[in-house]
């Protein structure tokens, strides 16, 4: 059953973790008045019918429990290409997925979550546990040297308009002059933007290891959301500084992470990254 309305997509693998993803999707759906769609990817056409029947029953149960419209969709393909393609070319506003964290060699090759997210034109909310509350109003906004940081700002504005609260901006203390200049440039742009809004925010400097410092800072302020931007490609600078995204996504505090892909398209209707 394909949904043609604006929707929040929940990746459904029939595991308890998927229930966690759905619970977070409910929080956003209630605040934005959009539907929820469960998505499952199969490898062959032969699997579609049986999975559709099973998913239909689950969607009906979840709809009754949440009092929301819950649709479902089964597609054939691979999770690393089909999910981002479906999300980017359908009526999807956000994708919510659960992750079990980074395991073994994935620390070298890139996490499962990042492989799924990369290339999507809509944001992903990556979760590890059930939501502790219904609002996402204590948001940690780490900034590093990458130009993709700027693309998070409109989503921070959107989240503030939705839940109010406060934005906590942190940036690493580095000695390399090139990285320092890039971080400073990102900070100036971000501060100028927020100064022209009514968004309460603070700025703090942390240590060089941004992934580790982000997680520790998030624990200190009891953040309920971390907002990051995924690098379009891994560069030489990533190997020098370390690709922080995968460690932040799989943080041991199990704090939800909203991941913005490079150059997300603005959307109409539903909710929007424009902050209006």
Image (cartoon, rainbow, N blue to C red):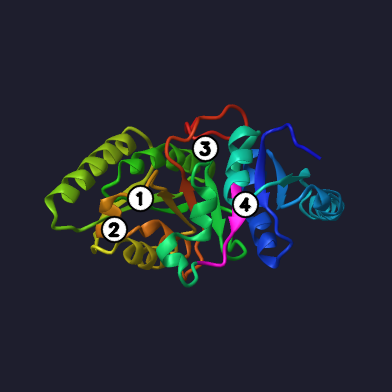
Q: Are marks 3 and 2 in contact (CB under 8 Å)?
A: no
Question: Image height check: is 255 above or below 182?
Answer: below
Whichever of callouts 3 and 4 sits on the residue coming sooner in the sequence is 4
| Location of residue 228 in the rendering, given as x and y in whole percent from the top left corner | 41, 50
Question: Quadrant of the image for the N terminus?
Answer: top right
- Residue at the spot 52% in from the left edge and 37% down from the top edge: 121
* C-alpha span from label 2 to label 4: 26 Å
Mark 3 or 2: the one toward you: 2
Magenta range:
95-101
Q: Quadrant of residue 152?
A: top left
- Residue at the spot 21% in from the left edge and 44% down from the top edge: 182
Q: Which mark is residue 79?
A: 4
- Residue at the spot 70% in from the left edge and 67% down from the top edge: 16
Mark 3 or 4: the one toward you: 4
* C-alpha span from label 3 to label 1: 18 Å
Element at label 2: helix
- The residue wearing badge 1 is 234
Q: Residues within 10 Å of mark 3 (few under 14, many from 20)?
A: many
Q: Is residue 208 left or right of residue 216?
A: left
| Location of residue 117 in the rendering, given as x and y in whole percent from the top left corner | 52, 49
Whichever of callouts 2 and 4 sits on the residue coming sooner in the sequence is 4
Question: Image height check: is 164 above or below 267?
Answer: below
Whichever of callouts 3 and 2 sits on the residue coming sooner in the sequence is 3
Which of 201 and 45 lies nearest the eye of the viewer?
45
| Location of residue 157 in the rendering, given as x and y in whole percent from the top left corner | 44, 39
- The residue wearing badge 3 is 121
Mark 3 or 1: the one toward you: 1
Q: Is residue 63 left or right of residue 210?
A: right
Q: Is residue 144 left or right of residue 57?
A: left
* C-alpha span from label 1 to label 4: 21 Å
Element at label 3: loop
């Amino acid at each position: 059953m394909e949904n043609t309305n604006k929707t929040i997509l929940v990746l459904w693998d029939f595991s308890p973790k998927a229930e966690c993803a759905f619970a977070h999707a409910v929080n956003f759906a209630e605040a934005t008045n959009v539907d929820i769609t469960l998505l499952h990817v199969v490898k062959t056409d032969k699997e579609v019918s049986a999975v559709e029947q099973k998913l239909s029953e689950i969607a009906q149960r979840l709809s009754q429990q949440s009092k929301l419209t819950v649709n479902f969709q089964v597609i054939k393909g691979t999770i690393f290409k089909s999910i981002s393609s479906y999300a980017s070319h359908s009526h999807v506003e956000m994708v919510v997925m659960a992750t079990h964290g980074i395991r073994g060699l994935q620390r070298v090759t890139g996490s499962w979550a990042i492989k799924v997210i990369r290339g999507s034109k809509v944001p992903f909310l990556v979760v590890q546990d059930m939501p502790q509350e219904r609002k996402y109003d204590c948001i940690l906004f780490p900034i590093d040297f990458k130009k993709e940081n700027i693309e998070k700002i409109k989503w921070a504005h959107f989240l503030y308009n939705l839940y109010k609260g406060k934005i906590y901006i942190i940036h690493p203390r580095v000695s390399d002059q090139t990285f320092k200049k890039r971080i400073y440039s990102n900070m100036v742009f971000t501060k100028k933007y927020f100064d022209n809004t009514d968004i309460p925010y603070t700025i703090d400097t942390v240590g060089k290891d941004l992934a580790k410092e982000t997680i520790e800072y998030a624990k200190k302020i009891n953040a309920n959301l971390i907002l990051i931007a995924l690098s379009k490609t891994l560069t030489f600078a990533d190997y020098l500084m370390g690709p922080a995204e995968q460690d932040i996504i799989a943080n041991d505090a199990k704090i939800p992470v909203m991941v913005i892909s490079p150059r997300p398209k603005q959307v109409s209707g539903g909710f929007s990254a424009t902050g209006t």
